[in-house]
Amino acid sequence: MRKIILMFVLLVSCSALFAQKVKVKKGIILVDKNKVAKIEKNKGIYKVSDLDGKVLFSAEAASKTIKGNPTNDLWLRFTGTNGNIREIERTNTSFTFSGEKIITRNLVVGPAAFLSASGIDTSLINDFFSKTDTSISDKIDSQYAAIKERHDKEDKIAEELKLKIDKNGNISLGKKIVGKIKRKEKENGSISFTYYTIVNLNSFIVASTKFPSDRNLTSILKGCKVKTYDKKEHIVNEKCSSDRVEEDKLANRIVKMLYANGYDLETASENYHSEKKKEYEEAYNKAVNNSVNIFDVEGYILDKKGEKIEGTISILYENIQAKMNPNSGMADLTNYGGIVNVKNSKGKVKSYKAKNGVVVFAGDQVFVGARGVGDGGLGNNSGTEVGLLGASQFFEVAYETNAGYILHHPKNPQYYYIMLKGNKKAYYLGEEGFLGKKPKEKIEKLFNEAVNCSALNFTDYDTLSKEGMIKILDDYTEKCSK
């Protein structure tokens, strides 16, 4: 309903806009075929009078400010007989090259709707010219003033550096050539563009831009976007002025802008690689901090023989490069979480596999090696998710008795497993399955296999919570272990 009402309002507005037909015939303005005023052109200025010849005001379709600053825009400027100037945006946007049509169409609609089929609204004219409003020109002039201020600063820096471009496009500081600006014209659809590329002596691209080759399609105010090697965009308010690169104002302005903004051609590639290295290090450190990996934590391990080996502990559960670039698409068959690295005081690193029954003490965390059973839907690569052969992982100990452990995988800490000491399998007794929710019969079968004790009845336990799993292990320790 709202859309219908909006459409109706638009239709009514358009109907009002075009309800009165305006024409000029032999210097007479006709509204709906009624003669209402006279119009006379003199050097682009249109003088509007009543039918008796009394001047009412003058008007022009302006594309320059009062100070003469040009734009690619077009607006209306009226001057009253009292000398007051009023500038307004065009109300009627119908395409035409005729200044006369632009003005007369706007005399029947909008804030300067002085004319109608019934005649001239003199009270509206008097009210309209009771004040001066040159806000459109003022805004554009202020933009030019800001551009000039920026250009003056750039020119001063260029003068201090003795910056110049020769006829071959070589960029030099004094007598030292530091780079080159290249120009190339290329068709892009129906428009021809001039491409500018600024390189240093190592052919490293410092900046680039494209600009319509037809100078009538360009505007100093709009300028062109220059992209620099650090992926930033800079507006250069200038137009191509010559086919000779050394005389081209745009080419020179681009180079001046670069140096004024700290883009030294001689150090650009070094800065780029330095920044890239910094970005990489920041991204790497962020990925490391957001990972569940264990990195260089003081601790020790007990190997399969029970020997204690001290050092700094590292266990990789996630591929850091993949976390930095998840869309890389690179295959990685590494068994993350299946190996612990121990670095001794001399910096020598030795690796131990989870499948060999290693126990890891890293800070205040304890990990044991085990192969997950029944956890195909969790996606932590702890066993059935990898394949039929399985892949042992280091699980973190959440609870321990002398008979076994309650474990969780660092990648899925919300899911708990039970593993009895002397067994290499950790059983997940939750609902998440490879193809959806596991049926209770499947969970019960896993429960019986995990504890293998007739004194424990599956229906007596909650296998979905940490507390429930701890209860199972406590009861097993009390009733089933020797």
Image (cartoon, rainbow, N blue to C red):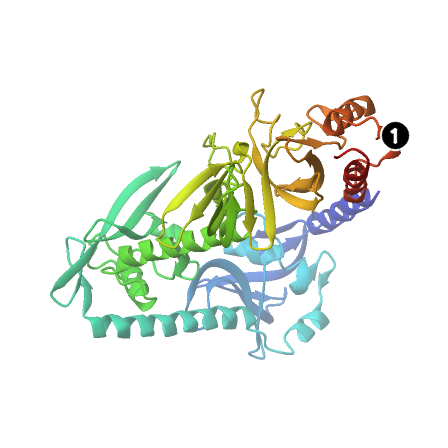
The C terminus sits in image quarter: top right
Q: Position of residue 159 (x, y in %)?
A: 22, 73
Q: Position of residue 329 (x, y in %)?
A: 47, 32
**Residue 270 vertical position relative to residue 148 in the rendered view, above or below:** above
Splitting the image into 4 quarters, where does residue 272 fall?
bottom left
Q: Residue at x 68, y 50 (%)?
A: 33
Determine if residue 129 is in view.
yes
Q: Residue at x 52, y 62 (%)?
A: 40
Front residue of this view, candidates 342 and 7: 342
Front residue of this view, candidates 230 and 305: 305
Q: Is residue 273 left or right of residue 178?
A: right
Q: Position of residue 269 (x, y in %)?
A: 27, 55
Q: Is residue 225 left or right of residue 41?
A: left
Q: Position of residue 145 (x, y in %)?
A: 42, 73
- Residue wearing tag 1: 459
Q: Is residue 333 left or right of residue 86?
A: left
Front residue of this view, candidates 117 and 335: 335
Which structural element holds mark 1? helix
Front residue of this view, candidates 348 and 103: 348
**Residue 126 vertical position relative to residue 222 in the rendered view, above or below:** below
Mark 1, residues whose alpha carbon is within 10 Å: few (<14), some, or many (≥20)?
few
The N terminus sits in image quarter: top right
Determine if residue 291 is in view.
no
The amino acid sitting under disc 1 is Thr
Furthest residue in direction left, as rendered: 175
